[in-house]
Amino acid sequence: MASLHGGQIIARALRAEGVDTVFTLTGGHILPILDGCVLEGIQVIDVRHEQSAAHAAEAYARLTGKLGVAVVTAGPGVTDTVTAVASAFYAGVPMLVIGGRHYIRQELRGGLQEMDHPRLLRSITGWAATAWQTDRLADYVATAARHAFSGRGKPVFLDVPLEVLAETLPEESLDFGTRYRTGDPVGADLDQLQQAARLLADSERPVVFAGGGLRPAGAAALAPFAEAVQAPVYLNGAGRGALPHGHPLLGKRSRKMAFAGADLVLALGVDWDFRTGYGKAIGPDATVIQVDADATKIGWNRPADLGIVADPARFLELMIGEADAFTRKSPPAWTTEIMAAEAAANAAVAETAASDESPIHPERFARDVAAFFGPDSIVAVDGGDVVSTTASWLQVSQPGHVLDPGPFGTLGTGAPFALAAKVLFPDKLVGIVYGDGGFGFNGMEYDTFVRLGLPVIGVVGNNGVWGNIKTIHRTMFPDRLVASDLGIRPYHAMVEALGGYGEFVDQPAEILPALERAVASGLPSLINVHVAEVMRLGSIYSM
């Protein structure tokens, strides 16, 4: 009679959920889980900081639509994941963090790394619990998955005492369960679809706006829908890539003008938060159709004239069935006007991006880096002003293949996001665009890239300052700047020391050749580019 220890029970339950990779930093409290993953054929990817393990689990979920899983040891192992869990919480990503836990017999006795982890995690998860029984471990994993995939999705947490993991039970006595959650996305009812179709048909100046709630797995419906409506389309956050670069309806720099003039905005999985001006950029008389899997998002900061609780991708698929009601044979004058403004804005910024000055202008940096990565790569972006500039140039044309940190504004996501991407898609070009501030958080994961032989291509826009913060600091306390400057540090040399390829660039003509040399090296690489410090107008801290 075969027996399974608790760690193998968890691993088998994860495998049944479709998980094929977990991210971890080893620790004594979780060794049975890691052993269980080996026994069950689940790939174990080990990192240098638990925050990276959890960030990588988030990226895994975003890229696959499956449950992302990080396994971390007790105490500081769990607390190290808190920032990453919060980031996934505000981004609405289904992710499971499994923590080790002290022995039950040491409860309240000061055992090694003793801590009540669920109490800490409850405010930033959809569910947090302790598994006290070995024979119920599979049920705990199933329960965690149900909570993780509810609504838009959210991180969940489970910790397991060491003796629960170590206990061995006969395989025949265990119930792994089946059909414990639905995988079908929630759709809209026919009345709502027909009402939305009528509003679209009656609008003269429609706009489609898709955000992080539009999941990559279903985003394929966006292009045919947009082409039926013939409306300008704008993408935000994790929604980037849902329309391919160069699509005639895709706008970026004309968004402000479009929102101000639209008579109807269809918002798909959009947060009306600081990234979208809390919805205030849309004219007060515009009709807003808001579609979201999370009912609490509808009407948040901006009234919704028609609120539909549904998965945005499923809504689009169903709306195509109603397309006869709103299909236009040619673009309305409004769309032609907006896309002409888009072309003019692009032409204007292209002049700046042609600059040959040194230090390199951020627009030139952004243009050349975006051209290098092209439409088919996966790009993680990690930073502030340099990254926001680059985002407007990126050509990535696959849903979900721009990995941004989401509304929590977390720095340090770049390397772990890219780690997950390269593990999942080893044949794709996977890159990271860093600000120099962002590199400092999890740059040590280049050791992970080198150890695992993952030739990720990183590029730093290095202006030697905390750019976003220094801008606002100057306006508040111009005579007392402090903690704003970093200097032009040799980050590339750190990567070289770890066994990767590094290069410093201070001339614009050398950006693309340096990136090509990085690819040719076959190694994890970092191109450290000296960009000019440019004061940006406006602030992410505005009310």
Image: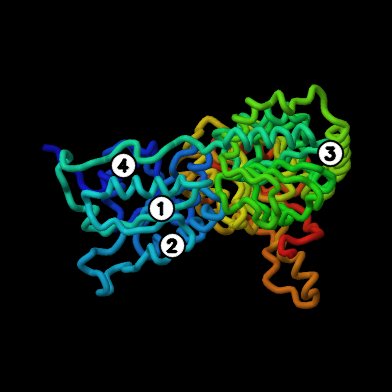
Residue in the picture at 84% in, 38% down? 342
- Which numbered tag is attached to residue 342? 3
In the displayed image of the protein, which residue is found farthest to the front? 191
Quarter of the image holding residue 280? Answer: bottom right
Is residue 205 placed above or below 389 in the rendered structure? Answer: above
Can residue 139 be seen in the rendering of this structure? yes
Q: Which is nearer the N-term, disc 3 or disc 1?
A: 1
Task: Looking at the picture, tell me which residue is in the foreground, 454 or 297.
Answer: 297
- Which numbered tag is attached to residue 13? 4
Residue in the picture at 72% in, 60% down? 540
Image spot of residue 214 (x, y percent): 60, 40
Residue in the picture at 79% in, 47% down? 286
Secondary structure of residue under mark 1: strand
Mark 1 near mark 2, Cβ–Cβ under 8 Å?
Answer: yes
Q: Label 3 is placed on what type of residue?
A: Glu
Residue in the picture at 35% in, 48% down? 143
Marks 1 and 2, Cα distance to the nearest angstrom?
10 Å
Q: Label 1 is placed on what type of residue?
A: Val
Secondary structure of residue under mark 3: helix
Marks 2 and 4, Cα distance to the nearest angstrom?
22 Å
Q: Which is nearer the N-term, disc 1 or disc 2?
A: 1
- Which numbered tag is attached to residue 121? 2
Q: Which residue is mark 1?
A: 97
Secondary structure of residue under mark 2: helix
Can residue 521 be seen in the rendering of this structure? no
Task: Looking at the picture, tell me which residue is in the foreground, 55 or 160.
Answer: 160
Marks 3 and 1, Cα distance to the nearest angstrom?
43 Å
Which image quarter is the C terminus in?
bottom right
Marks 4 and 3, Cα distance to the nearest angstrom?
50 Å
